[in-house]
Image (tube, rainbow, N blue to C red):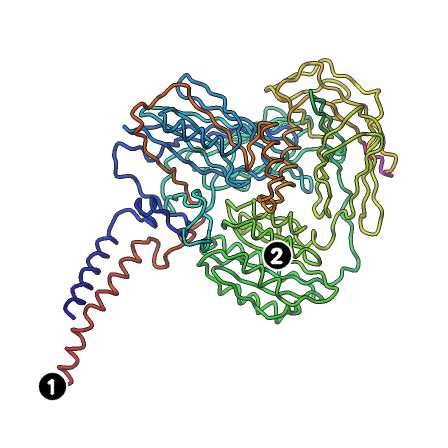
Amino acid sequence: MKKYHRLLCFMSVLLLVIASPVYSVYASEEADKQEDKTGAPYFYVESQEVNVDSFPLKKTNVIADINGMIAEIHVRQSYSNEGKSPINACYVFPASTKVTVHGMQMQIGDQLITAKIKEKEEAKEEFETAKEEGKSASLLSEERPNVFTMNIANIMPGDDVSIDLHYTELITPTDGIYQFVYPTVVGPRYVGPVIDDCGTREEWTATPYMPQGSEPKDSYDIHVNVSAAVPITELISSSHEIAVQWEKKTKAVVSLSDASDYAGNRDFILDYKMTGQDISTGMMLNTGENENFFMLMVQPPERYDIEDIPPREYIFVLDVSGSMSGYPLDTAKSLIKYLVSDLRDTDSFNLVLFSSDSIQMSKKSVPANNLNVNRALKMIDELEGGGGTELALALRNALAIPAKDEVSRSIVVITDGYIYGEEEIFDIIHKNIGNTDFFPFGIGTSVNRYLIEGIAKTGQGESFVVTEKEEASETAKRFKTYIQSPVLTDIQVKFDDFEVYDVEPSVLPTLFAQRPIVLLGKWRGEPTGTVQITGKAGNSDYAQTISLGDTTGIKMVNAKIENKNTVQLNSAGQKTAADLFGGNLVNESLTNTALKINGPTLSGAKADNQLVSAVTMESDVLSYLWAQKRIERLTDYGLNKDNPDVKAEVTQIGLNYSMLTPYTSFIAVTETVRNPEKNSKDVKQPLSLPLEVSNFALGGYLFGSEPSEILLMAALVLILLLQLPCVKRHLRRIKTV
C-alpha cells in the first residue's frame, strides 16, 4: 500500500509540473518527432533555441490581374532567416481548386533561379540530395488539389529568400456575378483513426497551428487589378474591408483598406459585375505551334417556372464537430432553420447530426408539417460543437434511411469540410448516384472548397458557401430556386464541319445555376462550320448555334497592350469581343498583329437574335485551362488516383505543359554549396487558425481552452485518489467513537 501511495504521489507531482508551462501544447517537440498516430494538428511550441528562427516566412504578397473572366495570379512568399543557424523550412498553404500553377522562381540575393517541372518522386529526390549537399533549394508539391507544400532547404543566417508562383484561373459568373476567391489558410483537418498500427499518414496533416487569438508572425497583402472592355458596375468583398481606386469605368484597383487587419486567416472573396452580360455566347480560338485550343462559352436561357413541382425528400446532414464550435455552428443552425422552415407540406425530410458519431431525428423521413419542423428546430437549438468529423459515417447512415418510391431525394450536407479523407466521401456519393443528388453547404471563413465542390460535382448538384450568419436566409432561397427549377437539362453539343478532339468536359451535367456552359478542347484544320447547343428548358426545346464560317472578320493591326496582358481594342470589333469575354484577351507575348476577331453573326436557331461570334488569339492561357479540366476529369476528385494509366497521363500533361499536378512538382536548386557545414535544422512553419475557428478544431481536449488544463485536472484527480485511504481511516475512527 505504501508503494502504491508513493507512486500516486510521484504521478501527481509529475502531472502538476507538466501542466504548468507557459506555452500550451497539444504535441510537444518530442511528440512531433515521434509523429502522433492521430495525425491531428497541434499547437505550436516556440523553439527554446535562440539561434533558430522559428518563423522563416515573413510576408506573402498576392497580385491578381483579372481581365474579364480569366485571372492571372502572382504570389510572392518572402522567407528570412533572422536566427544564427541554417534552417530548412516547410510551409503548408492553400489554393483554389480551379487554379493552374505553371510557373515558379526562387531568388536568393542576386541569384534568380527558374524552377523546373519534374516527376514528383524525381523532384523530391533532387531536393533531398541538394539539401544533404548543403545547396539551397525549394520544392513545390501538390498534396491535394487545394493544398500545397513549400519546402526550402539551407536558408542561411541573414538570407532573404523569395519564391514567386504564377497561377491561372477561369472565373465563370453565376446570375451575372463573377466571384474571385483566394484562399489564405488551410483549416485543421480531422484525420480519424489510422489505417494500420504504424500510424501511417501524410506528414502535412500534422501542421502546427498557433492557438486561437495568437498574434501572427507574418504579414499578408492582397492587390487585385480588375479590368474589362465594358464598365464594371460593382466591386464588393464579403470577407475583407477593401479600398477601391477607379482608374476608369472599365478598370479598378482593389486593395485592403486596413493594412493592420491580418488577411491571412480567411478566404479573400471579391464579387464583381459587368455590363453587357446579355451578349456572352461565343468561342475563343488559340492557334499554337503544335496544338490549337478553343474555349466555348454559352449563356443559358432564363430560368423557367414549374407550375407543378413533384414532392421531394430532403435529408439534412449537419456537422456538429469541434471545428464547428461557436460561430460556424451558429451560422449553420441559422441556415438549416431557413432550409427546414421553407419546405412544402408535400415534402418530407430528416435530420442527421454528426461529429465522432452520428444521430438522426427519425428512423424514416417525416412529413414537413409544423409539428415535425418544430421538432427539428428544437433539436438544432440544443446543439453544441465537439468531437471529430466522421462525415463518411453520417453519409452512410443518411443513405440507409428507407427511400420512398418515385420521390426524388436530395441530401444536403452542411459542414466546414475540415476532414482528411475526401476521396472516401466522393466514392460513397459516386456509388449512390441514381435518384439521389447532393447539395453541399460550406460554412465558415476558410472552408475546404475541395470537399464542397467535389461533393457537388460527384453528386450532380450545386455547391454553396456561407461565410456569415447574415447570408443564411439568402442562400437558403437560392438553394430552393436551384433545386426546384433547373435551368437546362439534357445538354448536347454538336460540331459540324469543325474538327475538334479532347473536349472537356466530355459529358455536360444538368445546369442548375444561371451560369455559362464552358467547353475547352483542341481543334484541327480551319475554323469553319458551326457549333450547335441543344437541351431542355422546362417543357421547351432549347437550341443555339455559333457560326465559325464567316471569314469577313476584322483583323486587328493596332492592338494596344497594357500591363503585358490586357489588350485594349480600338475598332468596331471592341464591343463584340468585350461582351463575349468581358474584355478578357490575355497574352504575355502578343504582337500587334496577333489578334483577329471574326465578325458577329446572328444565331439562326434563336428567336431573340442573340449575338454570337468567335475570337481568335495567340495565348497559352487556353492550354493551361484545358489541361486543368482534363486533369480534373481524369482524377475524378481522387477516385482514380490509384489507376496507373491515369497517373501516367496526368504526369505527362504536367510535364508537357509545365504544370503542377498530383504527380509533378516544381524544383529549384542553387549551383553553389551554401552550407558546407551541412548543419541545417528543420523548422515547421505554423499557421494561424482560420478566423472564428476555435481551439476545439484541433481536438484532444475538453476542459478549458488549453491542453495543460487537462493535465491539471488529471493531477487533481490523482491527488484525491491519494487522499482516499486517509479519508477511509478517518471515517472508521469516527464510526468507532
Query: What's the residue type where badge 1 is placed?
Result: Val
Give the SS element for disc 1.
loop
Q: Is residue 220 left or right of residue 480?
A: left
Q: CA distance from mark 1 to mark 2?
A: 69 Å
Query: What's the residue type where badge 2 is placed?
Result: Val
Give residue 470's mark: none
Residue stretch rendered in magenta on the structure: 606-611
Name the quarter where the N terminus is drawn: bottom left
Give residue 737's mark: 1
At 44% across and 42% down in the image, what residue appears?
204
Give the SS element for disc 2.
strand
Q: Quadrant of residue 154?
A: top left
Residue ID for mark 2: 412
Label 1 neighbour load within 10 Å: few <14, some 14-19, many 20+: few
Q: Quadrant of residue 374?
A: bottom right
The image position of residue 474, as x and y in percent, is 62, 51
Name the quarter where the C terminus is drawn: bottom left
At 71% across and 14% down in the image, what residue appears?
593
- Relative vertical location of residue 632 with respect to residue 3 in this rendering, above or below: above
The image position of residue 48, as x and y in percent, is 26, 39
In this rendered view, identify the residue nearer to me: 468 or 511.
Answer: 511
Label 2 neighbour load within 10 Å: few <14, some 14-19, many 20+: many
The image position of residue 216, as x and y in percent, is 38, 38
Q: Main secondary structure of the magenta part?
A: loop
Q: Quadrant of residue 219?
A: top left
Q: Is residue 10 left or right of residue 684?
A: left
The image position of residue 498, as x and y in percent, is 81, 29
Is 320 inside the magenta-drawn segment? no
